[in-house]
Image (cartoon, rainbow, N blue to C red):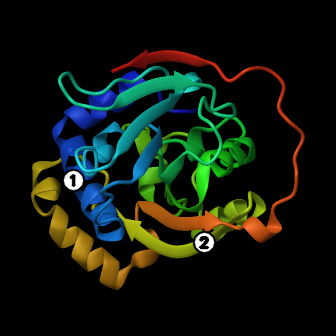
Amino acid sequence: MAIDVATAADFYAGRQGVVTARLVRERLASLWPDLSGRSLLGLGYPAPYLRLWRESAERCVALTPAQIGAARWPAGKPGLSCTAEEDTLPFPDLMFDRILLIHGLEAAENARRMLREVWRVLKDDGLLMVVVPNRRSPWAYLEATPFGHGQPYSARQLGGLLAASLFRVERRATALYLPPLDLRVVLRTARLWERAGRRLAPQFAGLTICEAVKDCYSAVPIRKLSGRRLVLSEAA
């Protein structure tokens, strides 16, 4: 079962969500420290994480797939948010330098079709960052958090899916080692959990992260999807 926008928004508004988002943002910032002048697409439920680059990126767009609902930027924040079908993204070919896919792949109705659309709108020298629940972690199975919905992946499964969708994995990372518990004592020691987990038990990270590039040499023509690309909702 995929997460819906209201449930995700409620989680990130609470103390557990605030700590979770901060830890994951720190990890993403270490991988993509500066996107000045770049065009960025966040796909899935990316708003809690796009704040890292929203002010510096040349263009920053948050797109929520229609099956999980419509999400918007916080009031007064610059950027564009929209909702569309996951396999018919409303953008021209080769539009984005960077794409962050979070709370998206595990919720996809057809993961390969979503990734082929991502491949289409990503520039040939662009980078894709995919963040998914790690199937070996309890975060993937507790529905009290957005990471406990949909299909979790191991690093090997995610790499295989990306390869089948004409991407080549360049870097792998992990994040979120603290237990998925909304307890003050756990949340206050979050960074300690992160440091210890990364050293002692990296296989049990809550999240698997892959950075990938387009494997242009493996690309073959595909049958054009029927129907128009339709933006269902949009807000400045």
The one of 149 and 120 positioned closer to us in this rendering: 120
Residue 149 x %, y %: 51, 39
Task: Name the residue carrying label 1.
Answer: 22
Nearest the eye: 3 or 48: 48
Q: Using the numbered discs, state the Cα–Cα distance from disc 1 to disc 2 in whole angstroms.
A: 25 Å
Give the mark, 1 or 2, whose residue is nearer the N terminus.
Answer: 1
Q: Is residue 104 above or below residue 167?
A: above
Q: Is residue 14 visible?
A: yes
Neighbourhood count class around disc 1 (C-alpha, 10 Å): few under 14, some 14–19, many 20 upward: some
Mark 1 vs mark 2: in front: 2
Quarter of the image where the C terminus is located: top left
Identify which amino acid the numbered label 1 is placed on: Arg
**Residue 146: percent from left, percent from top:** 41, 39
Residue at image location 58% in from the left, 32% down from the top:
1
Q: Indicate the amino acid at tag 2.
A: Val
Seen at 55% across and 75% down, the residue is 170
* Residue 142 appears anywhere in the view: no
Marker disc for residue 169: 2
Q: What is the secondary structure assignment of the residue under circle 2? A: strand
